Image (cartoon, rainbow, N blue to C red):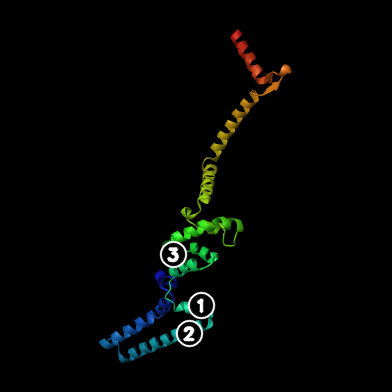
Amino acid sequence: MHFRHPLDLGGLYFSLNMFQPLFGLTLLLTLNLAKGSFSEQNLELLMSLTIGLGISLMLLFGTFLLLMNKEYRDSFFSMETGQQMARKNFLEGTDPMKADLFFNHKIYWLPIREKAAAWLQEGWTTWEDDKPDWFTDVWKSRIPADMKPAANRKVAAEADNDTALDVGGGEEHGRRRSVVEMISGQKAAKSKVMPAAGGEAKKEFDAAEFIREVNQRGTIGM
């Protein structure tokens, strides 16, 4: 069913495809008529049903075209496929139309990948400043990483690394940082100096260190 979608077939093929069952049924009845497979009464009934179905289908399709917006009628008779339309809108359209390209499957824009990448490189900085309506986080997530500007890729990579540290090793990283800060703090406290009389530097009195030295001397004396 996917390959019968108008974006794959184009408008004209899609319209003709709606009448395919009718054509197939008519052909089947014609072949069976030639072989004499049906009785005359059954054949007349089947032919009447087929003709009625065909007329009803054409009336419904014609009413649909009549009531719809005139600007879209041509799309049911166009041979342009969805891929061709997406690439045409990017090459000839405005920035919002170009941005819509990345909401399609990558096979749609693969033939114009280099042009799309150049457009991203050229306008990304401006969009960061102007913040157009279509320049959202959702749209950014649709852009392949290798097509984003180099500076933006670096920022994204650093953000991913920070996230990995927070999620995967956040607790261990926090403990390691706390130990380092504690040791650094102790060293800083022991290395404090105070100016003394005569301009000489005098180390600040450390009570904990003094007690340890007294205990060590007491142990040696014993």
For disc 1, the neighbor class at 10 Å (few under 14, some 14 to 19, many from 20) is: few
Vertical comparison of 166 with 27: above or below: above
Residue at label 1? 72
Residue 146 in percent (x, y) is at: 46, 53
Q: Earlier in the sequence, mark 2 or mark 3?
A: 2
**Mark carried by residue 16:** none
| Quadrant where the N terminus is found in the figure | bottom left
Vertical comparison of 18 with 218: above or below: below
In this rendering, the count of numbered labels is: 3
What is the distance, in whole Å, between disc 3 and disc 1 at their CAs? 22 Å
Q: Is residue 14 left or right of residue 71?
A: left
What is the distance, in whole Å, between disc 2 and disc 3 at their CAs? 31 Å
| Quadrant where the C terminus is found in the figure | top right
Residue 160 in percent (x, y) is at: 52, 47
Looking at the rendered structure, the kind of residue marked 3 is: Tyr
Residue at label 3? 108
Q: Earlier in the sequence, mark 3 or mark 1?
A: 1
- Residue shown at the point (31%, 91%) measured from the top left: 40
For disc 2, the neighbor class at 10 Å (few under 14, some 14 to 19, many from 20) is: few
The quadrant in which residue 172 appears is: top right
Element on which disc 2 rests: helix
Residue at label 2? 62
Q: Is residue 84 left or right of residue 192?
A: left
Comparing 198 with 205, the one in front is 198
The mark lying in front, picked from 2 and 1, is 1
Looking at the rendered structure, the kind of residue marked 1 is: Tyr
Q: Earlier in the sequence, mark 2 or mark 1?
A: 2
